[in-house]
Image (tube, helix red, strand yellow):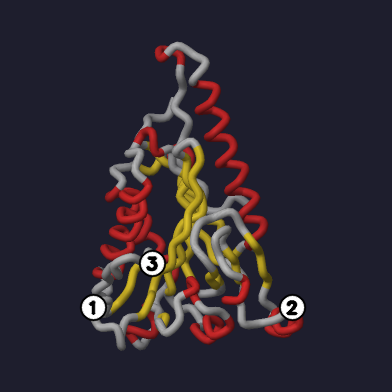
Amino acid sequence: MNEPNRVQVENLGIIDYKEAWDHQESLFKKVVAAKLHNRQLPESEQQFTGHYLLFCEHPHVVTLGKSGDEKNLLLNSEGLRQKQVAFYKINRGGDITYHGPGQLVAYPIFNLDYIFTDIHRYMRTLEEAVILTLAEYGIKGERLKGLTGVWLDAGIPAKARKICAMGVRTSHWVTMHGLALNVNTNLDYFSYIIPCGISGKAVTSIQAELGKTIPLNEVRQKLQHHILQVFELEENPAEISENRR
């Protein structure tokens, strides 16, 4: 049996958003079902329900969270078709965001019963992993009071720009969805939405800040290290999957 601090890491590569969402849902339901089953067993017979950490890139797609406003999508259906951008209404928190090539997406499916049962702390800890990753490139990531995600120059309203968006879903203290870090992302696509429903705030990427392309796999390895570090988890070497397909 796996230990409660072990996590299975999967690098899904470039994958259609719906395919990745379905995979997340499958793992999420598996963990929740195992938790509910455990409740019917004596403590001595309960089994660890598992943690998963998925990394991927998506083809161009815009997603709208359950509390989002569709008016923040600035393209109609024909515009989406012409730009080859898919659109999904999904079951995470938050408003609207864009995913696309050159953006590193991480989906933690964590059983918070084995970590800590505090959603606010969970979000701040995810942000901390991104801040530590950016620091390795000499970029000072910060939090902007009242908003989720990671920002640069957060204390200067005229210069504040978002580099990482976040939106999660939790049920029975199991998480899904996660974060999107702009690495080599084509930032032009953010002009087709009002990112996270926040007007007047710019977006940026590691590439834009450093003036050079950064290998996405390199950033993934650093972000993976920091996510596991801040949540005090370890990769399960017996279940490593570089690409499930």
Q: 4 above or below 87?
A: above
Separation of marks 3 and 1 at Cα, in angstroms: 29 Å
Q: Between 48 and 222, which is closer to the camera in this rendering?
A: 48
Check disc 3 and report the residue beneath it.
218
Q: Quadrant of residue 75?
A: bottom right
Q: Between 175 and 158, which is closer to the camera in this rendering?
A: 158
Circle 1 packing at 10 Å, graded few (<14), some (14-19), many (20+), is few
> Which residue is depicted at the point 31% across and 88% down?
158
Q: For residue 77, which numbered disc appears in the image?
A: 2
What kind of residue is marked 3? Glu
Q: 88 above or below 37?
A: below
Lower position in the chain sequence, tag 2 or tag 3? 2
Element assignment for label 2: helix
Q: Is residue 226 left or right of residue 38?
A: left
> Which residue is depicted at the point 52% across and 47% down?
241
Lower position in the chain sequence, tag 1 or tag 2? 2
